[in-house]
Amino acid sequence: MRMDALKVCCRWEHLKATGGVALVVGTWLTLVNQADVIATQGVGVAVLLKVMVNYLTPFVVSNIGLLARKA
């Protein structure tokens, strides 16, 4: 089951869709939650980790939705 899920998520057309969602939502989350910190303090390790999570979260959620639809 897990290998099948990985195959579904790694298909190019699915990566384009889930990656696009992650790009748009992750950028929005970063602007809303971290723009002031980045503007005043720059990008440190803690901020960089938060920004990475801002992009990873919608990517994972999009893939879960994809898998739920395929099930």
Image (cartoon, rainbow, N blue to C red):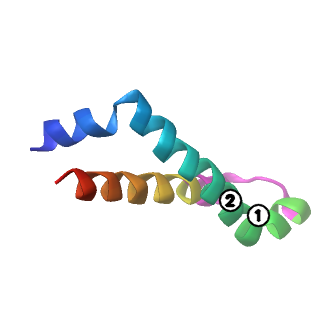
Amino acid under disc 2 = Val
Region in magenta: 41-52
Q: Nearer the viewer, residue 27 or 43?
A: 27
- Which residue is more in the foreground, 15 or 60? 15
Do tag 1 and tag 2 residues touch (Cβ < 8 Å)? no
Q: Secondary structure at mark 2?
A: helix
Quarter of the figure that contains the C terminus = bottom left
> Does the magenta run of residues contain 50?
yes
Q: For the point 49% across and 58% down, which residue is it?
A: 58
Residue at position x 47%, y 59% in the image: 57
Disc 1 vs disc 2: which is toward the camera? 1
How many residues crowd around disc 2 within 10 Å: few (fewer than 14), some, or many (20 or more)?
some
Q: Position of residue 19 (x, y in %)?
A: 52, 42
Residue 3, compared with residue 65, is above or below; it is above
Q: What secondary structure do most residues of the magenta stretch adopt? A: helix
Drawn side of residue 44 relative to residue 42, left or right: left
On the picture, is 15 further left or further right than 6? right
Q: Position of residue 67 (x, y in %)?
A: 26, 52
Q: Residue at x 69, y 55 (%)?
A: 27
Q: Is residue 20 left or right of residue 37?
A: left
Q: Amino acid at mark 1?
A: Leu
Residue at which label 1 appears: 31
Q: Helix, strand, or loop for circle 1?
A: helix
First along the sequence among labels 1 and 2: 1
Q: Position of residue 38 (x, y in %)?
A: 82, 60
Q: Where residue 13 sits: x, y (%)? A: 42, 33
Residue that carries the numbered disc 2 in the rendered image: 47
How far apart are the two marked residues, 1 and 2, measured between alpha carbons?
12 Å
In the picture, measured across the screen, residue 12 lies left or right of residue 25, that is: left
Query: Which quadrant of the view contains residue 26?
Result: bottom right
